Image (spheres, helix red, strand yellow):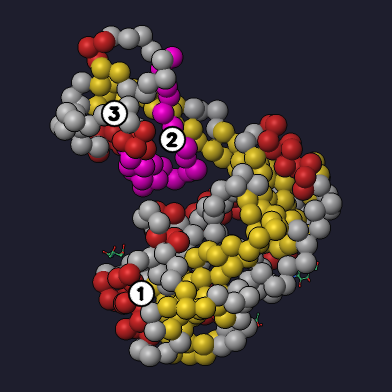
Amino acid sequence: MENVIKLMILAGLCSLCLCVYQYQYVLFHTPKTWTEAQSYCRETCVDLATMEDMSEMDMALQSVGDDYSDAVWIGLYKGSDLKWHWSIADKDFYKDGEENHLIWSSLGTDNCGGYYSGKLFTVSCLVTKYSVCFDISEQGAAQYILRPELTNWTTARDFCRRNYTDLVSLRNDTEYTTVQKVANGNSVFVGLFRDPWVWSDLTDSSLRYWRQSQVVNTEYHQNCVAILKNESGKWGDRKCTEMHPFLCKCKKSNLQIVKLGISLQDSTLDLNDPTVQNSILEQMKQRLSENVNDVIHVNWKKHSDGRVFIKETEKLNT
Ligand SMILES: *[C@@H]1O[C@H](CO)[C@@H](O)[C@H](O)[C@H]1NC(C)=O
Ligand SMILES: *[C@@H]1O[C@H](CO)[C@@H](O)[C@H](O)[C@H]1NC(C)=O
Ligand SMILES: *[C@@H]1O[C@H](CO)[C@@H](O)[C@H](O)[C@H]1NC(C)=O
Ligand SMILES: *[C@@H]1O[C@H](CO)[C@@H](O)[C@H](O)[C@H]1NC(C)=O
């Protein structure tokens, strides 16, 4: 913790408390229906398990281990509306609004995203097209790679994931232009898909880890999702009334409360302004996720008067 806080550039006379919750995934063995499992997790822990990216999915798989025979419920179920998502699920990859910078030429009923000449269009996930991959380990133009081979969307995504990072996301106008150049006049697949799945805790996570035989949206017959043993932990849809062990997201007992002193270089900054507080929290989260390999939750602790920050000179008791 010390190191993390030192990383922040701070100077001045304020004091506050910062709560760092750590979450962990916990497997419960007594078989329950999906809805019973959800209630149980909400009473005992936080909720059924949510995974926001592959590193969290890996942690979930570690918690489950080999310790089940068929399926383990997670917190994903079929909602009533279809929603667009980018294949790259990592939240830190997108700045404000960049996940929803969708510029459409036509919006039909198909569930995958194609890109042609500066605009997105809906296209069947089963047709074959060229595709554009993204490689986060490169810099500049080298991050965008055209794959001039005709494949369906799932095969394109799997290829991009194996060789690079994933199918490309179009986050802002610069990327729309870059990908147009890379596509070189071709109509291509990008990392956009639409499905009806929602998380029990309403986390807006687009992580999907379906078994191979399942494509985007169309082939899901059941309404609840489980980690499947015979698919090496990939997901499958199951009937919600089936009884299975289940994975909850639980608070770790080691809740840490950290008092943080902040000095202000810019004296016009109001530390009790929620925007300023959120911005500091975001930076903390980013630093923590670089330093701590676990699911982490950071929040402000408020004083009894509702303020988060107090001036050191006020000498209030916390
Ligand atoms: C996509 O293409 C691959 C390879 O040709 C094939 O195995 C797979 O079934 C196709 N997926 C769909 C959903 O058609
Ligand atoms: C991408 O992956 C495939 C299969 O894993 C491999 O055959 C191919 O050579 C790779 N291509 C590149 C450019 O790395
Ligand atoms: C678009 O996003 C990329 C990657 O984050 C960034 O380098 C670029 O400056 C952004 N362009 C605009 C116009 O925001
Ligand atoms: C797992 O089992 C289901 C039926 O229970 C079957 O349809 C599926 O093909 C199996 N998957 C693998 C990878 O064997």
Residue in the image at 42% along x and 64% along y = 101
Instruction: Give the mark nearest the N terminus, 3 or 2.
Output: 3
Of the residues shown, which amino acid type is indicated by label 3? Leu
Q: Quadrant of the N terminus?
A: top left
Distance Cα–Cα, label 1 vs label 3: 37 Å
Question: 19 or 217, which is in the foreground?
Answer: 217
Asked if 82 appears above or below 309 in the picture, the reply is below
Q: For mark 2, what is the residue?
A: 298
Residue in the image at 60% along x and 86% along y = 127
Residue 318 placed where, x, y %?
Answer: 38, 13
- Ligand 3 closer than 8 Å to the CB at disc 2? no
Check if mark 3's residue and mark 2's residue have beta carbons within 8 Å. Answer: no
Residue in the image at 36% along x and 42% along y = 282
Residue 99 placed where, x, y %?
Answer: 44, 60
- Ligand 3 closer than 8 Å to the CB at disc 3? no
Residue in the image at 27% along x and 69% along y = 139
Residue stretch in magenta: 279-304
Q: For mark 1, what is the residue?
A: 176
Asked if 201 appears above or below 254 in the picture, the reply is below
Q: For mark 3, what is the residue?
A: 271
Closest to the camera, between mark 3 and mark 2, is 3
Of the residues shown, which amino acid type is indicated by label 1? Tyr
Instruction: Give the mark nearest the N terminus, 2 or 1.
Output: 1
Circle 3 crowding by C-alpha within 10 Å: few under 14, some 14–19, many from 20? many
Distance Cα–Cα, label 3 vs label 2: 17 Å
Circle 2 crowding by C-alpha within 10 Å: few under 14, some 14–19, many from 20? some
Of the residues shown, which amino acid type is indicated by label 2? Val
Closest to the camera, between mark 2 and mark 1, is 1
- Residue 36 located left or right of residue 152: right
Circle 1 crowding by C-alpha within 10 Å: few under 14, some 14–19, many from 20? many
- Residue 280 located left or right of residue 112: left
